[in-house]
Image (spheres, rainbow, N blue to C red):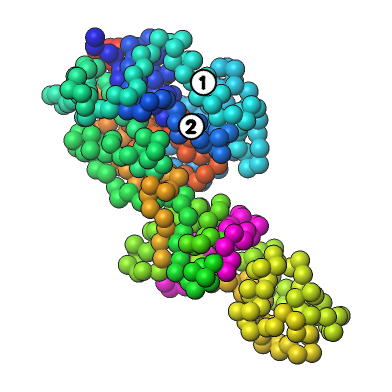
């Protein structure tokens, strides 16, 4: 049987593409090499599935630092508000949480996956799992179908590649789509991990002195070798046995990778401001006043509550201040250095965990070679791309799934419309 549209990949973008194509009345085959659909969706948002974000489109674009501006046209066709309507019409009621994040009221990612699969059945989309694709077949400058690893060839007018990047490989994202895109003439930009923990060889990391310690609402910065701030993110962070992790770190990670590469260096400096709401001189005066008002009390007891206890003791030790010392035995100079570290603690990092440990893949199929309102290839007729296989990446918080669903919608819709006029 010849299909109008074949969608390769059963992640969020592939599911949305297959549904959009099915809604146009096309004969659609959704094929995935894994044993079930929606594996990455089922574990997203800590198993709760952060389906989109309700911030204004302009804000969402800002939270997609990897070519987010490419999505302006796509959002004009199918926006985050359309995603919310789409799920609610399928019976998935959503609720808004902090920073605009949208979750199913059920708090169960599986309910989202089940609704999407139910929609595929309703639209009579054929689904095949455990069927790896060997390559996409091209003939005379257009897609002709796919060849499976089993040797079976399946004909189709249009093919949508929705196989993801190379992050979270146990869900099936192993980078298969890049070779198929290259065969069609596309450039694959450098792949790198984003939204990934950062590694460091600092002695305090190796000794695990701060392992497991969280800093709440810290301002974490990546510095370039010239001492200029590349990026700052203010969120929670966590010290680990290999470096640092947590929301602020994940958002900074791509800038560590890019700065290391741009300046061809082996380490870059990161800067922690543990008290971002206080100015340094005002903080110094505030601490000085506290110490003077209780001159016989141990420094660590006067400063209790200023910082998490382990971090406070760590910074006191770093500045050669005995936690049990009193104000009378504390030099102004040491106190100034301590306050400086509260605001600008610097440490060196040497990279990130590997791409397979990342939440998101940076790089991919160059968006310069994709029609932004259609998600179609500029080189091969009948070929469409969506989701993380494209060189588009956002921060965690519903931005990557939003990008996947929006690009999936356009790819499936336009592939079906193109196929139906063949």
The percent coordinates of residue 194 (x first, y second) are: 43, 50
Residue at image location 34% in from the left, 46% down from the top: 363
Check if residue 212 falls in the magenta segment.
yes
Residue that sits furthest to the right in the current view: 293
Residue at image location 56% in from the left, 39% down from the top: 46
Which residue in the protein does label 1 denote?
114
The vertical placement of 179 against 37, above or below, is below
Quarter residue 169 falls in: top left
Helix, strand or loop for disc 1: helix
Q: Is residue 335 left or right of residue 289?
A: left
Q: Quadrant of the N terminus?
A: top left
Helix, strand or loop for disc 2: helix
Residue at image location 53% in from the left, 60% down from the top: 240
Q: Quadrant of the C terminus?
A: top left
Residue that sits furthest to the front in the current view: 207
Question: How dense is the environment of label 2, judged by Cα within 10 Å: few (below 14), some, or many (20 and up)?
Answer: many
| Among the two numbered marks 2 and 1 on one chain, the one whose residue lies closer to the N terminus | 2
Specify whether residue 81 is in view: no
The vertical placement of 33 against 264, above or below, is above
Which residue in the protein does label 2 denote?
41
| Marker disc for residue 322 | none
The percent coordinates of residue 245 (x first, y second) are: 53, 56
Residue at image location 63% in from the left, 42% down from the top: 99
Name the one closer to the observer, 148 or 163. 148
Check if residue 255 falls in the magenta segment.
no
Number of callouts: 2
The vertical placement of 392 against 105, above or below, is below
Q: Main secondary structure of the magenta part?
A: strand
Q: Which residues are magenta?
A: 209-238
Quarter residue 292 falls in: bottom right
Specify whether residue 49 is in view: yes
Q: Is residue 202 left or right of residue 22?
A: right
């Amino acid at each position: 049987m010849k299909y109008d549209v074949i969608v390769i990949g059963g992640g969020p973008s592939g599911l949305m593409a297959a549904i959009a194509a099915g809604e146009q009345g096309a004969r659609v085959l959704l094929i995935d090499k894994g044993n079930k659909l929606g594996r990455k969706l089922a574990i997203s948002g800590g198993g709760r599935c952060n389906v989109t974000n309700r911030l204004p489109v302009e804000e969402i674009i800002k939270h997609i630092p990897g070519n987010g501006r490419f999505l302006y046209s796509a959002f004009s066709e199918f926006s985050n508000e359309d995603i919310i309507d789409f799920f609610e019409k399928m019976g998935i009621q959503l609720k808004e949480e902090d920073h605009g994040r949208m979750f199913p009221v059920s708090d169960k990612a599986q309910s989202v996956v089940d609704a999407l699969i139910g929609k595929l059945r309703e639209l009579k989309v054929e689904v095949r799992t455990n069927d790896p694709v060997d390559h996409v077949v091209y003939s005379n400058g257009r897609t002709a179908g796919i060849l499976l690893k089993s040797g079976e060839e399946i004909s189709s007018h249009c093919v949508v590649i929705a196989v993801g990047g190379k992050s979270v490989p146990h869900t099936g994202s192993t980078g298969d789509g890049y070779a198929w895109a290259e065969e069609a003439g596309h450039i694959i930009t450098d792949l790198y991990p984003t939204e990934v923990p950062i590694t460091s060889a600092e002695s305090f990391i190796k000794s695990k002195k701060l392992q497991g310690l969280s800093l709440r609402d810290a301002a974490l910065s990546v510095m370039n070798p010239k001492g200029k701030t590349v990026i700052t993110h203010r969120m929670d962070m966590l010290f680990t046995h290999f470096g640092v992790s947590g929301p602020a770190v994940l958002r900074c990670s791509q800038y560590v990778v890019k700065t290391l590469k741009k300046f061809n260096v082996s380490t870059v400096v990161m800067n922690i401001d543990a008290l971002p709401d206080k100015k340094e001189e005002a903080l110094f005066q505030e601490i000085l006043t506290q110490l003077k008002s209780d001159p016989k009390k141990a420094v660590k007891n006067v400063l209790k509550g200023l910082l998490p206890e382990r971090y406070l003791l760590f910074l006191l030790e770093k500045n050669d201040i005995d936690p049990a010392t009193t104000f009378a035995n504390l030099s102004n100079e040491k106190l100034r250095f301590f306050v400086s570290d509260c605001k600008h603690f610097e440490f060196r990092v040497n990279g990130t965990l590997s791409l397979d440990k990342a939440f998101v893949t940076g790089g991919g199929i160059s968006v310069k070679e994709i029609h932004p309102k259609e998600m179609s290839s500029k080189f091969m007729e009948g070929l469409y791309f969506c989701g993380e296989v494209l060189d588009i990446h956002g921060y965690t918080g519903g931005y990557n799934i939003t990008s996947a669903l929006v690009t999936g919608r356009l790819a499936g819709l336009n592939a079906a419309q193109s196929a139906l006029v063949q």
